[in-house]
Amino acid sequence: MKKVEALHKNLQKESELKSSASVLAQKNKSNNELAELLVQMRHKKPKEKEDLGEEDEKMPIIKYNTKMLDEVAPFTDQGLCLSMHQPYASLLVAGVKMDEGRVWPTTHRGRLWIAAAAKEPDEEEVLALENYYREFYKDDMLKFPKEYPTGCLLGCVTVEDCLDQEAYKETYGREASSPYMLVCSNPIILPVFYPISGKNKIYPLDKEIHKYAKIALQYSQY
């Protein structure tokens, strides 16, 4: 972890220097070393047991329909994560699935990291969902994730809003699949998927995983 942090700091310092052949060569070398270390982090085992648990009824309902300013939301990253079952998790970070339904509201706005739960997806369910979205978008050439990995951190989205069923229908003109809908945008897939144990509801990521996931995010293809 210390090596990753040191390499990242070196890259930041180098970006402030004037361009030259030697500086560019060193920067490319540091980039390659950092990429290799980030890939190696995939082998870090999760420390905790996965526990998605039952939905907690104690979460307070406080201004759940308050919308964050568009210019502020993308820059808000508190290291919070939501574990989802596959194939829904990958479809969300791939931008195919735009919203996520829950039985509880949330006041969270801004970046939300998405993790895939440990349960393997059912092949028939995957095919059914892919067909559903082809029909939804009226696009037979719609691109889907090549794989649906489990037990790992996949990427992130920006939570713009949280609406109840009535407000969601009024705003988007379609029925909500759950009592509350998280309206998401700006999906980003990490270049490497880090092992992680799922937890119930929205929860804070391990600080080290969060720190280096943000570094890896710089190498992501949006």
Image (spheres, rainbow, N blue to C red):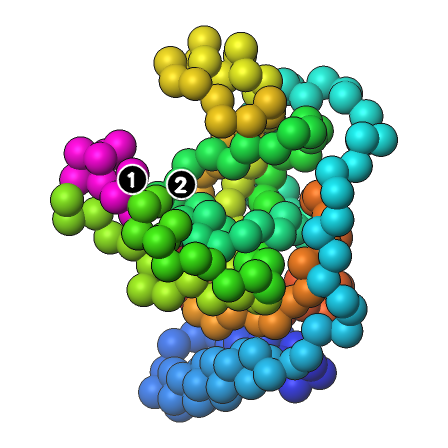
Number of numbered discs overlaid on the protein picture:
2
Q: Is residue 182 part of the magenta span, yes or no?
A: no
Decide which of 205, 86 is in the foreground and name it: 86
Residue drawn 56% across and 85% down? 40
Stretch in magenta? 130-139
Residue 216 appears anywhere in the view? no
Residue mark closest to the camera, 2 vs 1: 1
**x, y percent for residue 212:** 62, 69
**x, y percent for residue 72:** 57, 34
The image shows residue 67, relative to residue 173, as above or below, that is below
Look at the image and tell me in which quarter the C terminus lies. Answer: bottom left
The image shows residue 184, relative to residue 130, as above or below, that is above
- Kind of residue at disc 2: Lys
Give the main secondary structure of the magenta stretch: helix
* SS under mark 1: helix
Look at the image and tell me in which quarter the N terminus lies. Answer: bottom right
Q: Which mark is residue 76?
A: none
Decide if residue 101 is on the left or right side of residue 196.
Answer: left
Decide if residue 112 is on the left or right side of residue 125.
Answer: right
Give the Cα separation between the discs numbered 2 and 1.
8 Å
Q: Which residue is mark 2?
A: 97
* SS under mark 2: loop
Instruction: Tell me, yes or no, whether the two marked residues, 2 and 1, touch with CB atoms within 8 Å.
Output: yes
Q: Quadrant of residue 145?
A: bottom left
- Kind of residue at disc 1: Tyr
Q: Residue furthest right?
A: 58
Residue drawn 30% across and 52% down? 127
The image shows residue 136, relative to residue 91, as above or below, that is above
- Circle 1 packing at 10 Å, graded few (<14), some (14-19), many (20+), is some
**x, y percent for residue 66:** 64, 19
Q: Which mark is residue 133?
A: 1
